[in-house]
Amino acid sequence: MEAPILSAISEFFDAVAKLRKLGVIRSDKYLGDLAEYIGQHFYEIELAVSGRQVGYDGVDKEGKVQVKYHGSPTRTNIDLGDPSQYDNLLVVLGPGSLLRSTAHAEEFLVYRMSSATARSHLNQKKGTYSCGKLPFARQPDKVLSFQAAEIKLVEPAPK
């Protein structure tokens, strides 16, 4: 294996160890843990102690919250879980997500939707809930930007 690859792998695991020590990474699902931490920051979610909590990841002032992360540059949809198990859904789109609008340069875009909205994305054939780009064409509810070393809060666009 080439030295630059070994170095990058080492840096990756060093970063994971640092994030674990800081309480951001809580399991072996690094990107999901990162999305939950971002959601926790913006919405004061009390995350479930168990990483095996069924149906939702935590609770905030509005009830049960499910958090999903999408960072794939090739996957055209995102699984929304089971909306009967949560009150609100947070979807965090990472820097490489194919679902992102090109209008936003910030690294992480956060969208919040009700379980009722998530239910409207039923895939009749599979009996599952998922969606593509359309729900993320709107202004994100929150954004996290590293470039400015600050967190920018974006107000939702008027309806």
Image: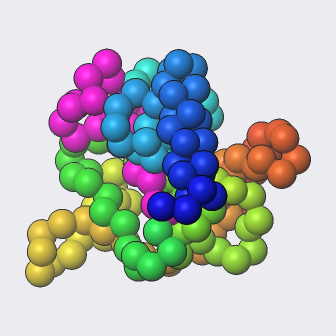
In-front residue for pair 74/13: 13
Quadrant assignment, res 158: bottom right
Q: Where's residue 101, x and y in %?
A: 64, 74
Relative placement, left or right, of 140 versus 63 is right
Q: Is residue 84 magenta?
A: no
Q: Which residues are magenta?
A: 48-71
Identified at 21% across, 32% down, the residue is 52
Relative placement, left or right, of 146 versus 113 is right
Q: Where's residue 81, x and y in %?
A: 26, 54
Q: Is residue 32 above or below residue 137?
A: above
Q: Where's residue 111, x and y in %?
A: 55, 54
Q: Looking at this view, name the residue that lies furthest to the right.
A: 148
Q: Is residue 112 above or below residue 86?
A: below
Q: Tell me if residue 136 can be seen.
A: no
Identified at 69% across, 50% down, the residue is 143
Identified at 55% across, 62% down, the residue is 2
Q: Tell me if residue 70 can be seen.
A: yes
Colouring used for the render: rainbow
Q: Is residue 112 above or below residue 60?
A: below
Q: Is residue 21 above or below residue 13?
A: above
Q: Where's residue 48, x and y in %?
A: 33, 23
Identified at 31% across, 68% down, the residue is 130
In-front residue for pair 34/137: 34
Q: Quadrant of the C terminus?
A: bottom right
Relative placement, left or right, of 117 versus 45 is left
In-front residue for pair 133/122: 133
Relative placement, left or right, of 16 versus 118 is right
Quadrant assignment, res 94: bottom right
- Total labels: the figure holds 0
